[in-house]
Image: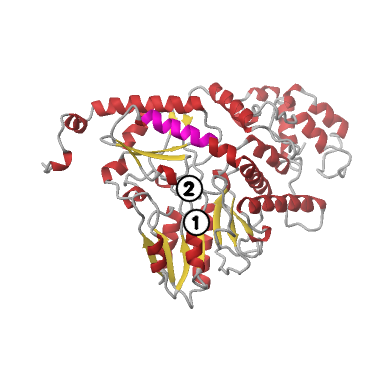
Amino acid sequence: MSTSKIPGLMRSSLRLAAHPASSKRPLPAHFATTTAPQYVSRSCKAEMAEVVDKSRPSDLFDLPPSISASSSSKLANSQATLDIIDPIVRRPDPLVVTPVSELREAENTQKQEKVGRPIYLDMQVLINSTSATTPLDPRVLDAMMPYMTNQYGNPHSKTHAYGWETEKAVETSRSHVANLIGASTKDIIFTSGATETNNMSIKGVARFYKERKRHIITTQTEHKCVLDSCRVLQDEGFDVTYLPVKSNGLIDLQQLADAIRPDTVLVSIMAVNNEIGIIQPMKEIGAIIRQHKGVFFHTDAAQAVGKIPIDVEEMQIDLLSMSSHKIYGPKGIGAAYVRRRPRVRLEPIMNGGGQERGLRSGTVPAPLVVGFGEACRLAKLELQNDHEHISRLSQRLNDKITQSCTHIVRNGDGTLGYPGCLNLSFEYIEGESLLMALKDVALSSGSACTSASLEPSYVLRALGASDENAHSSLRFGIGRFTTEQEVDYVAGKIVDVVTRLRELSPLWEMVQEGIDLKSINWSQH
């Protein structure tokens, strides 16, 4: 019989029922068990029972007469269907919040069972969909699953219940996103992530006001998508000022004030840097920009949202970029904050059906939006706990490494940065060699979006770091589910590998003998 019109979940069940041997095939890890024991999800049996619920139209799925509700129930009772899938599909009572400590413990238990998998210390909380990422919080998956199975309506369909229920979920999620940054719900535009949002914000504002203003200000340490967007505008005739940063990564506020001109249309400054974690003084920056009428303030906040308190009103931000997968949400979804009062106008870079206030056409992916909204709700709820947990582990990691090894430089100012992003340079060692020796630890030598390049980090060079130190840097990302045991293991591993690699280095031997390498006149042979 044809199953083309049967829902995906039921089609899979029918195939397994017809071919019992196929149930022995390994399933993806996230279909095996839930991460947290208290989040007991519905089995395929319960899911199918809901699919054939008599409250739905009998011909909803165009099932052949041979598959009645009763026979579907019998099918759901088969052992094959019991094991097909065990995702989290029931949204928990919003009043019942599982302690994150329990989730963390369950996550650690699951990690121990994954033999051969490296420890992940590349969790970044930053703007960009091209930087490192975070794992999906099991509570986020729980919220998403209904909209990937039964509630699959198009949120833009206004003529039936499927569209209405999905639209309601999307708007609820929009309010969660807005609440996290102190914004109005109407100011939130869903996008595919922070890279798209940065492009839309910078290019959109510049092109809309290009007849009167053609000057943009940004910094030398912005994310690559911001810098590349500015370079594109330079090719279109715009003038761009790239502000330098001090050795600690902060901009000079007086230099910012002096750089603003009558034809300046936009200032784009990252809230938290994705490589060194430095936090810019957003409130002070917003106050300086607000003194100049017609100059808009954009911030790439992908690494900041959900990690540090952000309030667009208090900071006087006009445009803000954020990304879901930086805060334990799904990949492929992000948002733009675009102020409506006073109104910020921008030219859309995508045209079509006029969704999202006409600024970002295309069908809104409801499951991703729901996951993003839940991640934002949890981020606001867990903000203080996350910060305390991450700060403690970051300090522990830094202390264990620096107390056991010498000639280590911390890039950026640790007292002015986000603790979840720790960037260290190990002198007299190539960062790539260190990464290759740490096969069981997932780390980056810089921003994940440029990690394929052998060029030294432009962010570290902007701080004044030498090419040698920039090449020897590693970025450690610590997140909600990082454990103390992982930190201790990684610290010990780093110390062992650094010691071994330095023993192989002739430069290290010269340093041990007291030779000043800078005084040597190296000649080519």
- Image: 234 above or below 500: below
Sequence-earlier tag: 1 or 2: 2
Horizontal arrangement in the rendering, residue 483 relative to residue 4 (left or right): left
Which SS does the magenta portion mostly show?
helix
10 Å crowding of disc 2: few (<14), some (14-19), many (20+): some
Q: Is residue 207 visible?
A: yes
Quick check: is 119 in the magenta stretch?
A: no
Relative depth, front residue between 235 and 390? 390
Q: CA distance from mark 1 to mark 2?
A: 23 Å
Q: How far from the left and from the top, in percent, is residue 372?
A: 63, 46
Which sits in the foreground, 316 or 510? 316
Write the residue at 64% across / 27% down: 32
Q: Position of residue 485 (x, y in %)?
A: 49, 24
Q: Secondary structure at mark 1?
A: helix
Going by the numbered disc 1, the residue's amino acid type is Met
Furthest residue to the bottom? 212
Q: Nearer the viewer, residue 270 or 139?
A: 270
- Disc 2 element: loop
Q: Position of residue 115 (x, y in %)?
A: 51, 22
Magenta range: 389-401
Where is the C terminus found, in terms of image quarters?
top left
- Are the residues tagged 1 and 2 within 8 Å (C-beta)? no
Q: In the picture shown, does residue 449 fall above or below 77? A: below
Q: Which quadrant holds the N terminus? A: top right
Q: How is the image coloured?
A: secondary structure
Q: Which mark is residue 130?
A: 2
Question: Which residue is denoted by mark 1 in the rendering?
Answer: 282
What is the three-letter code of the residue carrying label 2? Thr
Image quadrant where residue 217 sits: bottom left
- Residue 54, given in percent of the width and then of the height, sits at 89, 39
